[in-house]
Image (spheres, grey):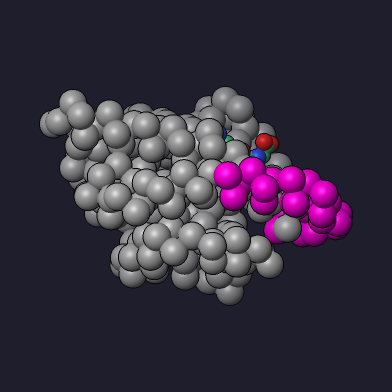
Amino acid sequence: MAPMKLYGSTMSWNVTRCAVALEEAGSDYEIVPINFATAEHKSPEHLARNPFGQVPALQDGDLYIFESRAICKYAARKNKPELLKEGSLEESAMVDVWMEVEANQYTSALNPILFQCLISPMLGGTTDQKAVEENLEKLKTVLQVYEARLTKYKYLAGDFLSLADINHVSVNLCLFATPHATVLDGYPHVKAWWSSLMERPSVQKVAALMKPSA
Ligand code: GS8
């Protein structure tokens, strides 16, 4: 069967969230860049893949999927279901909880920081330091909860790697491209968790793809 196609640029952390999950699952896929400069994301071809005219989108044969976290779940279900622990009611519930936390607590605080520090200057704007500071405070509150959790368990959902951990990778890699990576310094168990994720071949491969020279 033909490789799956992941549409979007590796400069987008929503796209690289999927790339890490696809790598971790061992999926056969290729990245198909979408050119924002020519508004390719709003073209009829791309709107057929993602009706919101956004990246990422995934094509697997006749199936089209959008929303990065749905794509990540699809890759896991298809190629490495243990990342979701669906065989266990309790463990899968914990994976679900921490996947929601990633989206609604962690990344919802980190996203504006990444936008202000990385995207706004690229678009010719400036960094709104007040927005950065406000969201750093929100992120620290979230990190306190992570520190307590990771003091008890090796990974977020328990003593096993899951998609909940993997879904954090792309935004964390971007955090390290901002001047604010030191925010993690006050949380030793979070730092140790992140170091263990960084050692994974899936993470190293996607980190290399995210470098502008790649
Ligand atoms: C968000 C996708 C998104 O914002 C997801 O897939 O997780 N909830 C969705 N994509 C941005 C790229 S930045 O990462 C995008 O495509 N923006 C262009 C636009 O909205 O026109």
Whether residue 193 is visible here, answered yes or no, is yes
Residue situated furthest right in the rendering: 125
Image coordinates for residue 8, horizontal then vertical, percent: 54, 48
Camera-side residue of 183 and 214: 183
Res 42 → quadrant: top right
In percent of the image, x 86 and y 54: which residue is there? 125
Image coordinates for residue 147, horizontal then vertical, percent: 43, 52
**Where does ligand 1 appear, by image quarter?**
top right
In percent of the image, x 39 and y 54: which residue is there? 20
Image coordinates for residue 66, horizontal then vertical, percent: 47, 32
Image coordinates for residue 113, horizontal then vertical, percent: 69, 51
Classify 139 as above or below 200.
above
In percent of the image, x 18 and y 26: which residue is there? 89
Q: Is residue 42 magenta?
A: no
Whether residue 28 is visible here, answered yes or no, is no
In percent of the image, x 73 and y 58: which residue is there? 117
197 on left or right of 125: left
Res 141 → quadrant: top right
Camera-side residue of 179 and 208: 179
Residue stretch in magenta: 118-141
